Amino acid sequence: MGAASTYSFKVVEDKSSIQGAETESTVLERLNASSLLIIERNRQKMNPGQERLMYKRDHGSRGCAAVLLRSTSFFLLLFLNGFCAYLWSADNKSIPWFTDIHQASLDAVAANKPMMLEFRADRCDPCKLMDEQVFPDPSVIEGVSRGFVPVRINADRTQALKNKYAVTVLPTIVFTDSYGTEIFRHSAYIDADVLSLLLRALPVDVTEINSFDRELTKDKYSFDAMDGLATELRKDSLYRLSNEYYNRALRLKMAKRDPRGKELILEAVAFNDIKLQESGEAAKIFESCLKEFPSSPSTPMFLLGLGQAYALSGDDDEARSVLQAVIGQYPNSDLAQRAREGLDALR
């Protein structure tokens, strides 16, 4: 790693950013589309295959799990974890925070659970407010108990972690896979209702994400691992981070040698952009695909996506024209039915 960066902190209480009644099916989509989500980008310019929080993994045939299982201390850890789980079930009135991220990660890896890292400080009034109003809320406690490993981190005392996760606003909650690779974050105050919805919307079984993360540890230029991780994140509605990995995959030589694979990735990126309310970016990609791949089997999907992007941007006339083209060229297809539904929504 290079020299640690220096960050100035902002302590933020931003209740206005959370508005209206939501459901778990919409909260991720809205937070994805807002400025509250920060992608894991620089992290000292680390890729998923570089420095890790806990330990160096064995890249042999048996992998990390075999190394851990050879350790007597790991069995002791499993016993302690089971005892903690018993205490949790016996008295589910508070969140059993870890304060050691290394131990928390071992716990998470053993069960393929995500971690929830809460960055805070003693001087942070919104953090205190969350202690009083948010974390004691039964719906939040229940959400954490679904399968998250909670870790409380004092940002004033852990410069390395603060720099690694680029924390500049307090409070900040970072959700990671079992190894500490970020998958989602929220900065500033978040009320109990929205946090409980977020906890129910995020994945609690990160087995597949962990698997792709391990592959990228072995080979940070693995096209299949990047594509697979992006697809898995997309399934979990983590659209912005999904696009980050899709775009990394597109920069690899493998994407240039596989035109059909490139098409499918571009299609996924554009539909992710629609979910993120980024209609302009989506329209550019669909327009480009229609020109670059004029005979593609994905042409009707490109047209449907382009119509949706135009509708999202408020360009109703262009949206109608494209959606009518889908119906005219593919009248008996499922996509034509979706195009009809899009037209009805414009009326």
Image: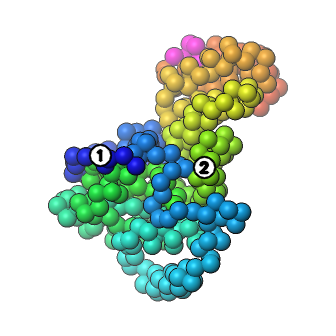
Residue at 58% x, 79% y: name it: 71
Could you tell whether 28 is left or right of 262 in the image?
left
Residue at 56% x, 13% y: name it: 317
Q: Which residue is mark 1?
A: 5
Dot 1 alpha-carbon crowd within 10 angstroms: few under 14, some 14 to 19, many 20 or more: few
Residue 326 quadrant: top right
Q: Is residue 71 visible?
A: yes
Earlier residue among tags 1 and 2: 1
Q: Main secondary structure of the magenta part?
A: helix
Residue at 60% x, 49% y: name it: 216
| Residue type beneath disc 1 | Ser
Q: How many marks?
A: 2
Front-most of 53 and 232? 53
Q: Position of residue 110 (x, y in %)?
A: 58, 72
Q: Which residue is mark 2?
A: 216
Dot 2 alpha-carbon crowd within 10 angstroms: few under 14, some 14 to 19, many 20 or more: many
Q: Position of residue 44 (x, y in %)?
A: 39, 45
Could you tell whether 315 is left or right of 258 in the image?
left
Check the image and report above or below for 303 versus 114. Answer: above
Q: Position of residue 267 (x, y in %)?
A: 65, 30
Judged from the image, the secondary structure of the residue bearing numbered disc 2 is helix
- The colour scheme is rainbow
Check the image and report above or below for 232 versus 321. Answer: below
